[in-house]
Image (cartoon, coloured by chain):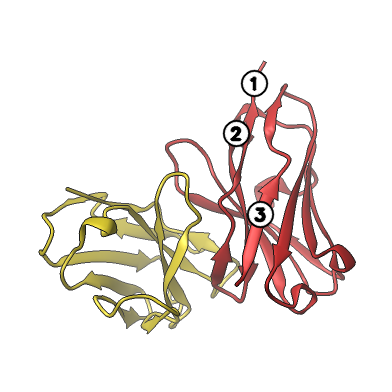
Chain colours: A red, B yellow
């Protein structure tokens, strides 16, 4: 059974940093693109970034380029999202998802709250 | 950027009724469209991919249709567990989601 479990969310002050993790199991992690998708309170889903199976290329939504970095460790079956210079508008539930052009498996998400 | 517009924003129905949800793209996405069900506190669930293909384990009451710019998700007879928010998503040009349709009692 495919499982994706996010962790690392929490309360952070504006301007701060946070690193999210996603532990994957039940499939050959190193064979798949992986993505991060977020949902801000009261808003819809927003794709954040994705990364190639071997980690050689990353893609980001334009509005987040330069502040967020996606990475992966295939030996640990883990996906990461490094978030810097956080703003109130980054407050959201962050989901990792297996990316096969659509997202066929998702985690439950981890809540990031940016507030002073 | 391709903008997906979903309608209606809220659909109020009773169990047993037919639900028809619409997703319109600002330019053609061919058949590169998926539908998801999202309940608070849960992982989103893939329902339909490539416009009309049901994902593994999805009941037959869910069906998708359309191509180009106009797409429809139909629930033939709404069950109590179907009340949720539904999103469409395209991958023809980068990735974008619609703003969602809430299926309400």
Both labels 2 and 3 in a single chain: yes
Q: To which chain does the residue with label 2 belong?
A: A
Circle 3 SS class: strand
Q: Quadrant of residue A98?
A: bottom right
Q: Is residue B32 left or right of residue A14?
A: left
Residue in view at x 27 percent, y 57 percent: B81
Q: Nearer the viewer, residue B72 or B48?
A: B48
Percent of width and height locating residue A15: 77, 25
Against A62, residue A41 (above or below) is: above
* Badge 3 and badge 1 both on one subunit: yes
- Chain of the residue where label 1 is placed in the rendered structure: A
Front residue of A102/B54: it is B54
Are the residues flagged by discs 3 and 1 in contact, CB closer than 8 Å?
no
Q: Between marks 2 and 3, how big is the CA–CA gap?
A: 19 Å
| Residue closest to the eye, B27 or A82 | A82
Q: Answer yes or no: do the residues labelled 2 and 1 have beta carbons within 8 Å?
A: yes
In the rendered image, the residue lying farthest to the front is: A1
Residue A65: image location, x then y, percent: 75, 49
Name the mark on residue A5: 3
Residue at the disc numbered 2: A91
Distance between the alpha carbons at the discs numbered 3 and 1: 24 Å
Q: Quadrant of residue B4?
A: bottom left
Answer with mark 2 or mark 3, whichever residue precedes in sequence.
Answer: 3
Query: Which residue lies under the disc numbered 1?
Result: A115
């Amino acid at each position: 059974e495919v499982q994706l479990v996010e962790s690392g969310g929490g309360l952070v002050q504006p301007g701060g940093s946070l690193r999210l993790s996603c532990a994957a199991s039940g499939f050959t992690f190193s064979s798949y693109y992986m993505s991060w998708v977020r949902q801000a309170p009261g808003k819809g889903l927003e794709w954040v970034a994705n990364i190639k199976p071997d980690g050689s290329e990353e893609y980001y939504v334009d509005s987040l380029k330069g502040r967020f970095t996606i990475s992966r460790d295939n030996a640990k079956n883990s996906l990461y999202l490094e978030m810097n210079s956080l703003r109130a508008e980054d407050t959201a539930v962050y989901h990792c998802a297996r990316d096969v052009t659509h997202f066929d498996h998702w985690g439950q998400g981890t809540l990031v709250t940016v507030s002073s | 950027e391709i903008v997906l517009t979903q309608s209606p924003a809220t659909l109020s129905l009773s169990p047993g009724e037919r639900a028809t949800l619409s997703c319109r793209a600002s330019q053609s996405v061919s058949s590169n469209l998926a539908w998801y069900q999202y309940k608070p506190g849960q992982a989103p669930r893939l329902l339909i991919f490539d416009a009309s293909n049901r994902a593994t384990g999805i009941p037959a009451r869910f069906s998708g249709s359309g191509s180009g710019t106009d797409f429809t998700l139909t629930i033939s007879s709404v069950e109590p567990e179907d009340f949720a928010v539904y999103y469409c998503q395209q991958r023809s040009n980068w990735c974008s989601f619609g703003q969602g349709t809430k299926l309400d009692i």
